[in-house]
Amino acid sequence: MLKYKMRRLIALLLSAAVGLPGFSQQKVTLPGVFNPEMIEVNDRFLYITEDMRIKIFDKEDYQLFKTVGKRGEGPGEFMGFIIPYVFSEYIFVNCPGKILYFTLEGEFIREIRAMKVFGRFKPVGGGFVGYNYTRIDGVRYEQLFLYDNKFTRQKELYRRRYIRQDDGSLNLINERPPFLYIYQNHIYLDSVEGDILVFSYQGEPVKTITWPKELIPFTPKYKQRFEEGLKNNPRTREFYFRSRKDLAYPDHLPIIRMFHLSRGLLYILTSREGDGDTLEMLTVDLEGNILARQFVAIGPFARSLFPLHYTVFDRTLYVLEENLEADTWELHVTDLSLAH
């Protein structure tokens, strides 16, 4: 649980969104949004997680349609920090001590209590797939496991080094939540080598989706820019001075910062930079063919390490941007099929 509290703190400190210069887009002020944590989208709704609630907005007018959940231990209530995922038929919510199912309109369906369970779990086959944490030979790892319907571990699929190690070192450059997607009963996740690994619902390797990659060295200029960004931002200044002695840096920038899978296409955010605080986004098919390269802005370098304030759905980019002067949050909607 402490790992998720730390990640939530880092998310609040380091994530911020900016507009997309040069792109045709829709911009909407969202009512009643003050401290968003995650954003997901489907054909009809926009879902924003905030303070143990899921706020559902109708995409017709982006007005609040329904607020789901509250703190509590009863059916449909949340006992702590939540991580929801929107599937084609329901909302699936991770919560300490249980998982919950809601309709896409936010009506409670059922829940499964499992007191030792909390993480980024998703249903697959007759069980679940999700991350847990371990220490092996003095090294902390995030491990991806296949679980049965009782949340008993069945098979390890992948592991990566955790950003915080026993010596206190904190590698924020590689910070990102462990993401995975379920598509046509297959599991898709990215590796630190920059490939997309595909497994069957039984956990058997199916294929590796790969393409030519650029390895970008983490030079002193990146370190200076990163630390200056933390130090000069009012939201992160205190965190920087408290944690700077623990900051550790990799040899190169992450090959994949984040990826999304929507309707059979992968949207991969790389570390390659363009003008105006933009990063490269690749549109890739499931055979590894690059269909489009374009630069998008989801946040300045020092504040885009935990990019949960954006998502991609059906060739459309959705970015939450905080308007500090107006004390509001705005949604920027960009048609990626029109971008070059």
Image: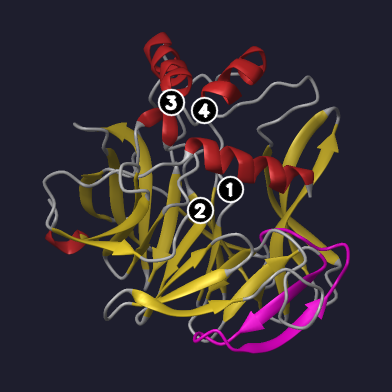
The residues bearing labels 1 and 3 have C-alpha atoms spaced at a distance of 22 Å
- Residue to which mark 2 is pinned: 35
Count how many numbered circles sit on residues in the image.
4
Pointer 1 with pointer 4, Cβ within 8 A: no
The residues bearing labels 4 and 3 have C-alpha atoms spaced at a distance of 5 Å
Secondary structure at badge 3 equals loop
Query: Residue 334: which quarter of the image?
Result: bottom left
Extent of the magenta region:
97-120
List x then y, in percent, for residue 185.
Answer: 56, 77
Question: Observer-nearest residue: 259 or 333?
Answer: 333
For discs 1 and 2, the disc positioned in front in the rendered view: 2
For discs 1 and 4, the disc positioned in front in the rendered view: 4
Q: Residues within 10 Å of mark 4 (few under 14, many from 20)?
A: some
Pointer 4 with pointer 3, Cβ within 8 A: yes
- Residue to which mark 4 is pinned: 236
Inspect the image, locate mark 3, and give the three-letter code of the amino acid beneath it. Answer: Asn
User: Which mark is on residue 102?
Assistant: none
**Quick check: 129 left or right of 222?**
right
List x then y, in percent, for residue 11.
Answer: 55, 43
Image position of 247 with respect to 298: above or below: above
Inspect the image, locate mark 4, and give the three-letter code of the amino acid beneath it. Answer: Thr
Inspect the image, locate mark 1, and give the three-letter code of the amino acid beneath it. Answer: Pro
The residues bearing labels 1 and 4 have C-alpha atoms spaced at a distance of 19 Å
The residues bearing labels 1 and 2 have C-alpha atoms spaced at a distance of 18 Å
The residues bearing labels 2 and 3 have C-alpha atoms spaced at a distance of 17 Å
Secondary structure at badge 1 equals loop
Residue at point 56%, 59% (across, down): 180
**Residue 114 among those drawn in magenta:** yes
- Residue to which mark 3 is pinned: 233
Secondary structure at badge 4 equals loop
The colour scheme of the drawn protein is secondary structure
